[in-house]
Image (spheres, helix red, strand yellow):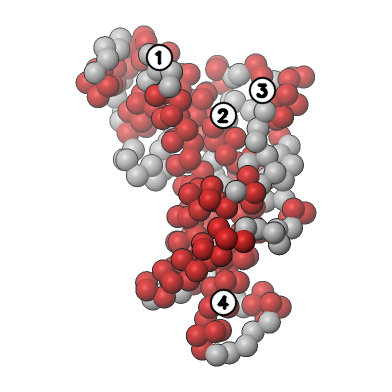
């Protein structure tokens, strides 16, 4: 796994299932999650979290790099200044809403440039390539993972003797190495001596924490994050492999 966090694949397992995720405590767990389209209520947070996805998607619609950059900057500025007041919470998923308004912004820009009037209904009927849709989903997924890694890194820095982020990165980047080798590697990277047994314990806890963070990131983009809704979005974004074993049944 490299520093760009493009697609880390830490394996998860059921042995560390947080008891707050099971049985009658499920409602308490869900209530702990910050919900109701966090990004909609905080445009600055939106730019930080999903700017990459916006940028890549605009590039699939407008192929000239300079034109695509102009559209992106215009869109971002408008969102920061005016927010997402037209968001329809009935759609449930923020990424569905967002891909529509990004696409409309790109189409409106093209119409203005070419001086061709086009109604909202007309824009909705314009074809969108499957590649563009796949690109959007892929980059949204990367945004979720990047946010989870950043949160894990922050958690490590504020917790004494915590090497969660370092051990998980090492395990993801060198999946074929055994615990003694990885423990030695992490010791050299962190400047803290770590025995194989301690490495395994830290890795197990790091996987559980990482799964929690992914779930929280996904839940923030859902209007009413139920367990089934979260699972559905995790599957749609190919993120379930990171959290299997940590969700309530």
Q: Residue under label 1, please give it.
A: 160
Task: Name which residue lies at 70% across and 30% down.
Answer: 30
In the rendered image, residue 1, in percent from the top left (x then y), is placed at 34, 38
Q: Are marks 2 and 1 in contact (CB under 8 Å)?
A: no
Look at the picture and state if 137 lies above or below 147. Answer: below
Is residue 185 left or right of 22 when viewed as pictured? left
Report, in whole angstroms, how far the alpha carbon at label 3 lies from the one at label 1: 25 Å
Q: Are marks 4 and 3 in contact (CB under 8 Å)?
A: no
Q: Residue under label 4, please give it.
A: 107
Report, in whole angstroms, how far the alpha carbon at label 1 lies from the one at label 4: 51 Å
Q: Do the residues labelled 2 and 3 touch (CB within 8 Å)?
A: no
Depth-wise, is mark 2 or mark 1 nearer the camera?
1
Mark carried by residue 212: 2
Residue 128 in sight here: no
Give 184 or 164, whichever is nearer the viewer.
Answer: 164
Give 82 or 164, whichever is nearer the viewer.
Answer: 82
Depth-wise, is mark 4 or mark 3 nearer the camera?
4
């Amino acid at each position: 796994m490299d520093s760009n966090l493009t697609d880390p694949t830490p394996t998860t397992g059921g042995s560390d299932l947080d008891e707050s995720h099971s049985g009658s405590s499920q409602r308490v767990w869900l209530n702990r999650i910050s919900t109701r389209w966090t990004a909609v209520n905080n445009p600055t947070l939106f730019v930080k979290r999903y700017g990459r996805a916006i940028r890549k998607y605009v590039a699939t619609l407008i192929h000239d790099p300079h034109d695509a950059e102009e559209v992106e900057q215009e869109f971002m500025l408008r969102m920061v200044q005016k927010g997402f007041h037209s968001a329809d919470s009935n759609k449930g998923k923020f990424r569905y809403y967002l891909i529509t308004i990004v696409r409309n912004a790109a189409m409106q820009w093209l119409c203005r440039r070419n001086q061709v009037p086009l109604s909202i209904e007309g824009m909705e009927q314009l074809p969108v390539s499957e590649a563009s849709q796949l690109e959007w989903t892929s980059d949204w997924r990367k945004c979720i993972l990047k946010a989870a890694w950043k949160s894990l890194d922050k958690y490590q820095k504020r917790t004494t003797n915590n090497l969660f982020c370092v051990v998980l990165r090492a395990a993801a980047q060198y999946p074929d190495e055994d615990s003694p080798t990885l423990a030695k590697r992490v010791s050299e990277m962190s400047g803290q001596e770590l025995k194989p047994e301690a490495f395994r314990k830290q890795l197990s806890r790091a996987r559980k924490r990482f799964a929690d963070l992914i779930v929280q990131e996904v839940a923030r983009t859902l209007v009413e994050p139920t367990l089934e809704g979260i699972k559905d979005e995790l599957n749609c974004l190919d993120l379930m492999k990171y959290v299997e074993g940590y969700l309530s049944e």
